[in-house]
Image (cartoon, helix red, strand yellow):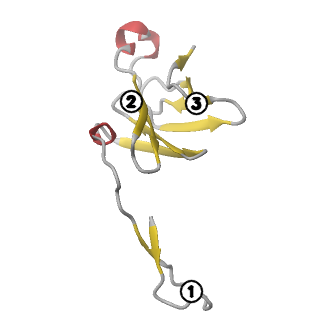
Amino acid sequence: ITKSSSSSTSSTHRGRRPHIQAQLIHHDPLLSQGVPHGLHYHEGYLYHANNQQRVTKTTLQGRVIWSTDFSSWQHEYPHFWPILPTDVVSVPPTDRLLVADGYGSHYLHALNATTGDYIP
């Protein structure tokens, strides 16, 4: 994200917002599947919750680090099905993410923030 200044840095904006211009540096098709919901920033990474049974970790430039696909849970964990992730939050100082299933079975699930592996 770049910020362009249309006024002097010594003046205040007095109710005006600075012009913000965003540029997508890298695009991965994984990030546009389903309906994107929660986006969480933690320690230099973005965690994307997508209600098409997916949570994805990316760099700030959009490069995918890992993606956890929950679609197999229909058979592996049927008591949690359907799962439609709507938000992700980190649990400091651990390496744990909590995934909110807001539209599916309404559970909270835990993932390892480094690997994306499910933590039972």
Position of residue 57 in the picture relative to residue 120 (left or right):
left
Mark 1 is surrounded, within 10 Å at the Cα level, by few (under 14), some (14 to 19) or many (20 or more) other residues, namely few
User: Residue beneath label 1, please?
Assistant: 13
Q: Residues within 10 Å of mark 2 (few under 14, many from 20)?
A: many
- Residue to which mark 2 is pinned: 54
What secondary structure is found at the residue carrying circle 2?
strand
Residue 112 as seen in the image, left or right of residue 39: right
Q: Position of residue 1 (x, y in %)?
A: 44, 64
Instruction: Tell me the kind of residue under disc 3.
Output: Leu
Picture coordinates of residue 50, whole percent (x, y):
39, 36
| Residue 19 against residue 24 in the figure, above or below | below
Q: Which numbered disc, 1 or 3, marks the residue that appears first in the sequence?
A: 1
Residue hosting label 3: 98
The quadrant of the image that shows the C terminus is top right
Q: Could you tell me the amino acid type at mark 2? A: Arg
The quarter holding residue 8 reads bottom right
Q: Which badge, 1 or 2, comes first in the chain's sequence? A: 1
What percent of the width, then of the height, locates residue 70?
39, 21
Q: CA distance from mark 2 to mark 3?
A: 13 Å
Residue 73: name its quadrant.
Answer: top left
Q: Residue at x 50, y 90 (%)?
A: 7
Residue 28 lies in what quarter of the image? top left
Q: Amino acid at mark 1?
A: His
Percent position of residue 117, x then y: 51, 20
